[in-house]
Image: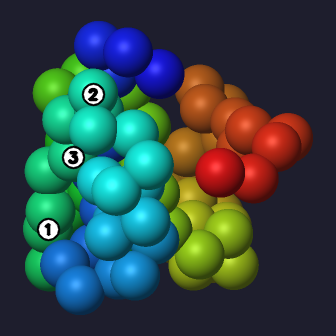
Amino acid sequence: MRGKTLAGIKADYALTVLKEHYPELKILEYDSIGECAEQLKAQNVDGIVADEQNIMHYGQGEKMFQDYYILDEEV
């Protein structure tokens, strides 16, 4: 995880946990899953931290899964 940058939604508890356990991560916070996805598409971040259902719902509408995938393991 060293050297990785992740996007997440502001006030998501998962970001707090990641910051605590993985201080080497760079975490950028946004207002919506759409903003996070735009950062991923622009290659400004390496991944998105969010509820899987929210990512799946957004990603299906945007046809994101042609280029991206969800990691098999939970963080």
Q: Residue 36, percent across and down?
A: 27, 56
Q: Residue 3, percent across and down?
A: 29, 13
Which is nearer the eye, 57 or 14?
14
Kindly identify the residue that appears in the image at 21 percent across and 46 percent down: 27
The amino acid at mark 3 is Ile
* Disc 2 residue crowd, few under 14, some 14–19, many 20+, Cα 10 Å: some
Looking at the picture, the colour scheme in use is rainbow
Q: Mark 3 highlights which residue?
A: 27
Kindly identify the residue that appears in the image at 32 percent across and 70 percent down: 16
The amino acid at mark 2 is Glu
Which is nearer the eye, 19 or 11?
19
Kindly identify the residue that appears in the image at 67 percent across and 69 percent down: 52
Q: Secondary structure at mark 2?
A: loop
Disc 1 or disc 2, which is closer to the eye? 2
The amino acid at mark 1 is Tyr
Q: CA distance from mark 2 to mark 3?
A: 9 Å
> In the displayed structure, would residue 69 be above or below residue 59?
above
Q: Secondary structure at mark 1?
A: strand
Residue 42 appears in view = no
* Disc 1 residue crowd, few under 14, some 14–19, many 20+, Cα 10 Å: some
Apparent side of residue 8 relative to residue 73 in the rendered image (left or right): left
Q: Residue 28, percent across and down?
A: 14, 50
Q: CA distance from mark 1 to mark 3?
A: 10 Å
> In the displayed structure, would residue 8 be above or below residue 75?
below
Q: Mark 1 highlights which residue?
A: 30
> In the displayed structure, would residue 57 be above or below residue 24?
below
Q: Which mark is residue 24?
A: 2
* Disc 3 residue crowd, few under 14, some 14–19, many 20+, Cα 10 Å: many
Apparent side of residue 41 relative to residue 1 in the rendered image (left or right): left
Q: CA distance from mark 1 to mark 2?
A: 19 Å
